[in-house]
Each structure stands twice: as C-alpha cells, then as structure tokens.
Image (tube, helix red, strand yellow):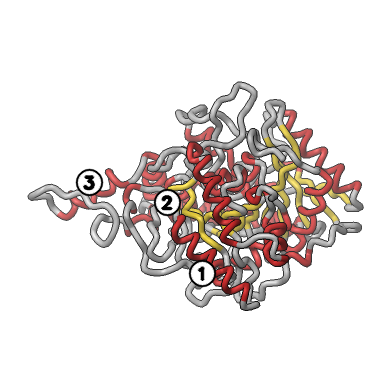
Amino acid sequence: MTDLTKLTLAEARDGLAKGDYTSVELTEAHLKSMDAHRNLNAYITETPEKAMEMAKASDAKRAKGSAGKMEGLPIAVKDLFCTEGVQTTAASHILEGFKPEYESTVTSNLFGNGAVMLGKANLDEFAMGSSNTSSYYGNVINPWKDKSGKDLVPGGSSGGSAAAVAANMALAATGTDTGGSIRQPASYCGIVGLKPTYGRCSRWGIVAFASSLDQAGPMTKTVRDAAIMLGSMAGHDAKDSTSAPIAVPDFEAALTGDIRGMKIGIPKEYRVDGMPEEISKLWDNGVAMLRDAGAEVVDVTLPHTKYALGTYYIVAPAEASSNLARYDGLRYGQRVMDDGDSLDDMYMKSRAAGFGKEVQRRIMIGTYVLSAGYYDAYYNKALKVRRRIYQDFEGAFGQVDAILTPTAPSAAFAIGENEGDPVKMYLNDVFTVPASLAGLPGISVPTGLSAEGLPLGLQLIGKPFDEETVLRVGGVLESAANFTAKPAGQEG
C-alpha cells in the first residue's frame, strides 16, 4: 500500500471516497509517523485515543453516505485553539493543565466537517515569535537540514504545525497569523501557508495575542489542500464581532490554472537593502513564471512599507499587554502564592513564573506605549501609519489583481543563531507584516531551494476577501515552480 502519510489532503480525501483505505488506517499511519518523529517536538499534546475514536466515527459516517468535506482526514491543531476537554496551553507555563470546556469555532467547523485531530501542535509562547524557540515545552526542530547538519528553526509562531506537515506527521494543520506566523514557517519548512483576510475565519476560542491582527488559516502540502481546508474553517460567527458576514465561496473551484490577462504587482519597496542574492533571484524567477503563464507584470509602489515593522511592534505588543492582563493566577492557569503574600504579590509572582522572557518583553513594550505619557507619541501615531499602509495597498490594487513578494528574507537558520538579538529576530517578518497590518489575504508557496538546500517561498497578497484570486495565482506559481524537494527521510 502507498505510504499514507505522503498523500496530500486532496489525494487522501479522494482515496477515502473510493474506499482505497479507511480513516482508521490513515490515522494509524500518521500516529506511527508521530512516534517516529517525536524528536522534532512538533506536538505539545498528542491525542491518539481521541484520534482513533474520531476516525472510527468518521468511517461509520461515510458508510452511511453522510461524509463531510474533511471527513476522516487527520490534522494537527495549533495549541492556540481551545479544544474541549483537551489541554490548551498556548505553549505557556501559565496555562499548563488548562482544559477548556468549549471548542473554538474554527476547530468546531473542521470537526463538524469530519476532520480528525491527531494532537495539539507546538508554537512560540502565546504566538509571540518567529522561530518557535520561545515555547515553554521546548523548541521545535525543522525537519529540513542544511549542509552542515545543524538543527534549524521551523519558523514561528506556527512552527509545530509547519514541521508536522513537512515531516508527514499530519496531512495538514491549523495555524494562526498575526504578523506572518503562518506564511514564514511555511516558507522555512517548504509547505503552503495561507493567511486569510482578517475576519474570514472566526477568532472565537483562539487564545488572543493581538486582536486586530490575529487570523486563523490552513498550513498544507499544496495550494489545493489550502483551498479545501479553508473552505471548512471559514464562515461568519455571531460569537466574534470581527467575523465578516460574508458567504464562503468554493475556494477549490477557483483553481482553474488560468491567469491569462491578470495583472501582478511587484512593489519596489520590498527590495530591501542587504537582501540576499538568492532571495532576489527567487523573486525574479517567480515574476518570470507568472509572466510565462500569461499574466501582466506591473510595477507598483507601497511607500509606507518601510514603517510597517515598527508600526507592528507597537500595535501588536500594545494589544498583547491588554489581552494578557487576564492571566493573573486567580481565575485559571498557574498560581504562585506563599503564606502571607498579598494579592499583588500573587499576581506578580504568578505572572513572573508563568510567562517566558519574550512574552514579558512584549507585555512591557505594550504597557509602555499605552502609558499616559506615550500613548499619543507611539500608539496613536502607529494607528495612523497603519491606515496609510492599508491605503497604499488600496491604491496598488486599483492597478493589479495580486502582488508578488518574497515570503521571508532568508531560509531557515540554526537554532540559537539570532537568540541574543530580538530586533534581528523581528526582521524575519519584514515581508509578511504589511499584509497583516492591512488585514489582507496572503499565501506562501514553496518555489525553490537556497544554496544550502533549504526551501524558499514566495508570497502572494490579494484584495480583501479575494482568497480565490490568491489561490488561483498560487496554484499557477506552484505548478510552474514544480517544487518537489522534501526533507531528508521524507522523499518519495
């Protein structure tokens, strides 16, 4: 029998429909793969018993002729999504042992469509990071290796999800993207990562980082898989005031393979100083691929792009400092209290012990920019610049259908390489943050290899709620690039 873990989501779906194998067989194969690759630390909580129960129920449902769109397909769930009765930690000590009594809307939608949960994937603590090295449960290791054989970061914050998909430990995975946390790890791990338009997928039941930026999305092996999974994740949710009351189209039907006559924008501002030659060459190759497919390439300008990273690292920490104020050791999560301590002491000790250094750093930054003396100077000004960034995109989309850029400024780097320089770590999101600030859909598609043999991705950005165009162009780019390289041990 074919190695079931090497199937795409679409292939597995079609095989189940034809009766080539059962969901139980598919799930068992992935559970074995999880055992074999536990050294990558991609999962915080594995749920084999639950997975088998869901798989058996799925097979029974299919036998009755009532299969859903994701029926019987085993996936990983980023440990930022609340899952009823299953530990949800956000990769933080402060939430260790927390078992929600409710299900996030996104996972509820997926499970309602028949998806099977293999476990909760590792991430940067509270989704704050771009390397997946800030997790309380240890860093995730990228299944890819450079020529020196060093352990590499998988990107972040959705690094566990990316590694699980790349190493065939899940057919697909949920991720969340605040400033690039789906797209950047997808690029580092050689998979597809789609950040939908802000409001396309409900945020209800997702542990909050920055409420005006957080967006759930699929992490998959192919663009078609991303279209399939997004169709089961998305939809209006009355429980989320930021959820858009917009119908969910048939995303898979958008993959026509025809982009003739479409206009693709190339923003000059993304050619940043010091851009590695291999990233520039990758971008040029992507432009040529789309031109050869019949698209018209148009130069566009996004003049406020240079302010995007600074703006993001004011807005996101400010919202984080507010959202994380609820973790006080009183209502749920870890509590540190010695005899005779005051309530204030308990708050301080619980938060100091429960939050890691990166989370503490961002809370401090956020509290500072929201303080009385600096609110107007920093936070208010950042909101004004954010509006200008959105207007730049609005102007560009008056001329083009989609925008092509690199996803990340480099391939995956060695674990620990940039740990001592937070600013250098933040620069990993330089190409993904602008679309996040503007709330636009973006997809990373693997299109080449670095000189070290590591995957590199290109990003497509679309108009609000036009994921169909992003997916259509992404599918053409994927086909033209014909990216077939796999991490060591995953070939075939």
Classify mark 3: helix, strand or loop.
helix
Examine the rendering and report whether any part of residue 204 can be seen: yes
Residue beneath label 2, please? 45
Q: Are marks 2 and 3 in contact (CB under 8 Å)?
A: no
Q: Nearer the viewer, mark 2 or mark 1?
A: 2
Q: Is residue 471 left or right of residue 376?
A: right
Q: Nearer the viewer, mark 1 or mark 3?
A: 1
- The quarter holding residue 451 reads top right
Residue beneath label 3, please? 349
Query: Residue 103 at what x, y percent from top left?
Result: 44, 68
User: Which amino acid type corresponds to the residue marked 3 in the rendered image?
Assistant: Lys
Specify few, some or many for label 3: CA neighbours under 10 Å numbering under 14, 14-19, or 20 or more: some
Query: Residue 492 at what x, y percent from top left?
Result: 72, 40
Residue beneath label 1, please? 108
User: Which amino acid type corresponds to the residue marked 2 in the rendered image?
Assistant: Thr
Classify mark 2: helix, strand or loop.
strand
Query: Residue 355 at what x, y percent from top left?
Result: 34, 45
User: Residues under labels 2 and 1: Cα distance?
Assistant: 18 Å
Q: What residue sits 64% from the left and 63% below the top?
A: 230
